[in-house]
Image (cartoon, helix red, strand yellow):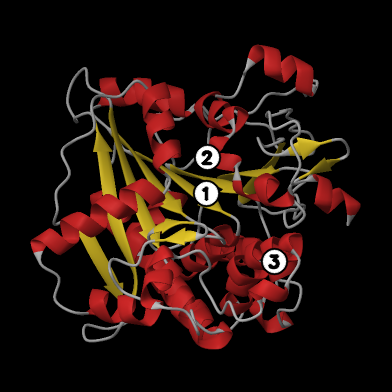
């Protein structure tokens, strides 16, 4: 507990990064080269982004934005109704601010694509289980550059499944009971605060980050009903991306935390569709490596070991095995590449060790930016800051490095300010 206590004291908050790509089939798939090729080949890089735990539909941790509603159930009801064009534009703006905004801008800048295209207020889609069913989540896109000779095009597809999770947790944990409407709208705490005043400050913070917004989501996903709702949102994102992908396009699927398990489960189940299957079973004619398909996976903070530990044998235990079997059953002659990122201080993430035939795994070890003091690094920062890590961005752009880098100490990091 002493280590937890000192985590709230001033200390080293500078990123210390290193990488290692041992124990993997080494391939340097480079988004930077994809971008250069797209200018010559009249193609587009398409990136699907799937979030993990600790995500709000809108707003940020501890400061949720409920669009004037006082509960998540009320927000779900509002999104399930008829939204005006002004409603969609407002919600899309809030979604842009809270969903991968830093990562999207950073990657677009590094790939040197054109300006971001003006937002289309209609480009905010509510995802439902059925035509008249409640809202489960939403999806929107962001585009940079223009397809054509001499232009580099980049398009992001962002799918958010957090709404349904928030409603379920609110029902189970309780909402802002006993508070006034004005206090509710401040959103200092998302769920029942009746015991907050009796908790020690550090315990309160840990419960909020690890249970309410962490393992609570993972526990929900293990429920067949809730898990299927999460997968329906991701499935809508995959379908939209696939429907717009041309023969000269490349696809990167970037997922975080719990989102990686959801994504693999979803993609494996969708390989019966010829269109989706083609992304993973047809070789990219412009690729640097033989048998490389047009799609590649990048996974941050993987939780397969935790989330599949209790799965019954009939479910084939590991979604990676499920994906590998689905690819073999589909007659794939390709080998799908997965880059799995893990921070050793991320207590929920473990490297991927499964040996497969049609899936090639490369573990990339990084140290994320975050609060560090002495022998302690805040586990929340280690788990959540992959998308803010310079080395992660560099790996996406130019592939992983073969040789590990020596970790920076705090003094060197302060002087160099390698991470803004």
Classify mark 3: residues with Cα within 10 Å, few (<14), some (14-19) or many (20+).
some
Q: Position of residue 313 (x, y in %)?
A: 73, 81
Q: Position of residue 366 (x, y in %)?
A: 70, 35
Q: Position of residue 65 (x, y in %)?
A: 37, 62
Q: Secondary structure at mark 1?
A: loop
Please determine whether, in this image, residue 190 is positioned above or below residue 6. Answer: below
The residue that mark 3 highlights is 204
Classify mark 2: residues with Cα within 10 Å, few (<14), some (14-19) or many (20+).
some
- Between label 3 and label 2, give the one nearer the viewer: 3
The residue that mark 1 highlights is 333
Q: Secondary structure at mark 3?
A: helix
In the picture as drawn, the residue positioned furthest to the left comes out as 85
In the picture as drawn, the residue positioned furthest to the top comes out as 415
Q: Residue at x 17, y 44 (%)?
A: 119
Reading the chain from its start, which is encountered first: label 3 or label 2? 3
Q: Are marks 2 and 1 in contact (CB under 8 Å)?
A: yes
User: Mark on residue 225?
Assistant: none
Please determine whether, in this image, residue 409 is positioned above or below residue 282. Answer: above
Q: Secondary structure at mark 2?
A: loop
Q: Position of residue 30 (x, y in %)?
A: 50, 27
- For this rendering, which residue is in front, 304 or 84? 84
Q: Residue at x 27, y 83 (%)?
A: 130
The N terminus sits in image quarter: bottom right
The C terminus sits in image quarter: top right
Q: In 3D space, how far apart are the residues under numbered discs 1 and 3 (Cα atoms)? A: 51 Å
Please determine whether, in this image, residue 87 is positioned above or below residue 332. Answer: below
The residue that mark 2 highlights is 291
Q: Residue at x 42, y 67 (%)?
A: 161
């Amino acid at each position: 507990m002493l280590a937890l206590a000192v985590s709230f004291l001033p200390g080293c908050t500078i990123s210390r990064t290193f990488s290692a790509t041992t124990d993997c089939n080494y391939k340097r798939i480079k988004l930077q080269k994809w971008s250069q090729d797209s200018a010559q080949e009249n193609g587009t890089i398409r990136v699907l982004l799937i979030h993990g735990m600790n995500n709000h539909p809108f707003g940020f941790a501890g400061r949720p934005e409920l669009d004037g509603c006082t509960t998540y159930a009320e927000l779900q009801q509002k999104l399930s109704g008829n939204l005006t064009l002004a409603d969609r534009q407002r919600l899309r703006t809030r979604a842009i601010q809270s969903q991968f905004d830093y990562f999207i801008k950073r990657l677009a800048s590094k790939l040197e694509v054109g300006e971001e295209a003006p937002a289309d207020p209609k480009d905010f889609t509510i995802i439902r289980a059925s035509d008249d069913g409640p809202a489960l989540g939403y999806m929107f896109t962001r585009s940079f550059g223009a397809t054509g000779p001499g232009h580099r095009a980049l398009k992001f597809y962002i799918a958010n499944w957090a709404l349904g999770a928030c409603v379920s947790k609110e029902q189970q944990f309780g909402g802002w009971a006993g508070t006034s409407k004005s206090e509710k709208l401040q959103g200092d705490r998302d769920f029942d605060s009746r015991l907050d005043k009796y908790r020690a400050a550090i315990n309160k913070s840990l419960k909020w980050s690890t249970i309410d917004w962490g393992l609570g989501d993972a526990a929900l996903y293990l429920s067949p009903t809730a898990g299927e709702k999460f997968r329906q949102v991701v499935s809508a994102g995959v379908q939209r991306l696939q429907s717009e992908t041309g023969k000269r396009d490349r696809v990167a699927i970037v997922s975080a935390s719990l989102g990686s398990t959801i994504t693999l489960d979803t993609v494996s189940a969708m390989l019966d569709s010829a269109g989706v299957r083609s992304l993973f079973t047809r070789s990219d004619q412009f690729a640097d490596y033989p048998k490389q398909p047009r799609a590649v996976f990048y996974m941050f903070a993987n939780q397969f070991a935790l989330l599949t530990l209790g799965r019954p044998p009939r479910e084939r235990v590991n979604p990676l095995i499920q994906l590998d079997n689905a690819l073999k059953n589909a007659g794939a002659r390709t080998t799908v590449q997965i880059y799995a990122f893990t921070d050793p201080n991320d207590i929920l993430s473990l490297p991927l060790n499964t040996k497969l035939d049609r899936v090639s795994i490369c573990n990339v070890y990084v140290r994320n930016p975050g609060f560090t003091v002495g022998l302690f690094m805040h586990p929340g920062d280690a788990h959540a800051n992959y998308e803010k890590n310079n080395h992660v961005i560099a790996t996406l752009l130019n592939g992983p490095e073969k040789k590990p880098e020596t970790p920076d100490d705090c003094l060197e990091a302060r002087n160099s300010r390698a991470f803004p």
